[in-house]
Amino acid sequence: MRKLISITLLVLLLALPSFAGEGMPASHLDSSTGMVRLDDSVFADGARLLGGVHGAGAVYELTVPVWARSVALAVDWWTPRPGDGIALYVYDHSADSTDEFLGLPGEDLHWRLWGSSTDSSGLAVGSPEFLLLSRENPGGITPIDSEGTLRVLLWAEGGLPFVTDELVYLEQLRWRFSERDELWRRTPEWSSLSVPADATGFDFQRGLLIAGGSGRAGQAGSARGRLLAARAATVQALNLAVVYINEVVQRGVDSGKLPGYRILSEEELPGGSVRVEVGIPLNGAGGLAEFLGFAEITSK
């Protein structure tokens, strides 16, 4: 396997115990290069890649669903020679993607390493697990073209003497599409978080996590004093929201990293103090459920 440790964008394999997705037989490739044979006896509807001198690759194309915002891929494969492996590349459609350093040497320089594996069998999963489809990923990768077509390359390294090349058998590719931007998510399944209906701060009727706080500034009565008091009250409210969250999930949430909130009310109290009530959406894009890694937050 060609050493690509200098590439900092896409590196380590994320090994997952299961991967639910849409299956594609490995024999349904779009094109190939090098010594690739279909319908091998090991897998009835599979493909065999023998690296040989220059390497071998199988290219697969798929039109992504219009609703999808991110995609992950797993590959069922096997090798009879311990230490052999495969590399997973994705075709980068960005305008400046033909970089000789980042591309696959000897092949189209638009290919970008997405992941690799040297296990004797199992899954080769991209790292990061998901790639965004609706906008550029870190490093500027654009994985789909204007028609919504995604291309990936499974590559077996070549070499001399022949014992240094790679022999792999591919069984199927399994795609997983999501309606969410899941670039940094590492769990293959999304579950719901069920919270007691009377959990403090959770207003399921309004769909908000609500918390309040108060603050007081030294310059009471001035516009600047009121602003500083309101800011202090907001910080206190967000800290209280974290307490409410940690009562239902043990995540060690940082108040400085909470998702978008809005000020529900702001009231000036006698003596120059200000009381603020904040609300954080429970569900939807950018909501608390997404922030915590759940599909949704429901009451029980």
Image (cartoon, rainbow, N blue to C red):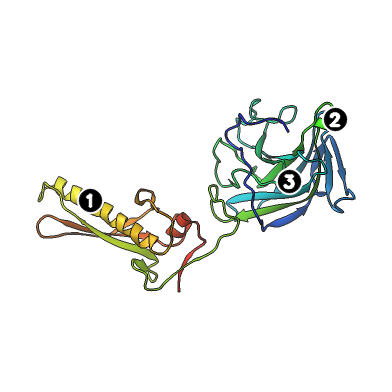
Q: CA distance from mark 2 to mark 1?
A: 68 Å
Would you say residue 141 is visible in this rendering?
yes
Corner quadrant of residue 198: bottom left
User: Mark 1 or mark 3, which is nearer the start of the sequence?
Assistant: 3
Neighbor class of circle 2 (other Cα within 10 Å; few <14, some 14-19, many 20+) is few
Q: Which mark is residue 61?
A: 3
Q: Residue at x 83, y 44 (%)?
A: 80
Q: Mark 1: which amino acid?
A: Ala
Neighbor class of circle 1 (other Cα within 10 Å; few <14, some 14-19, many 20+) is many
Q: Nearer the viewer, residue 2 or 131?
A: 2
In percent of width and height, residue 185 lies at: 54, 51
Q: Which mark is residue 292?
A: none
Q: How many marks?
A: 3
Residue 218 position (above or below residue 67): above
Q: Residue at x 67, y 49 (%)?
A: 73
Q: CA distance from mark 3 to mark 2?
A: 30 Å
Corner quadrant of residue 169: top right
- Which residue extends farthest right? 41
Q: Mark 3: which amino acid?
A: Glu
Q: Quadrant of the C terminus?
A: bottom left
Mark 2 = which residue? 162
Q: Left or right: 144 with respect to 236?
A: right
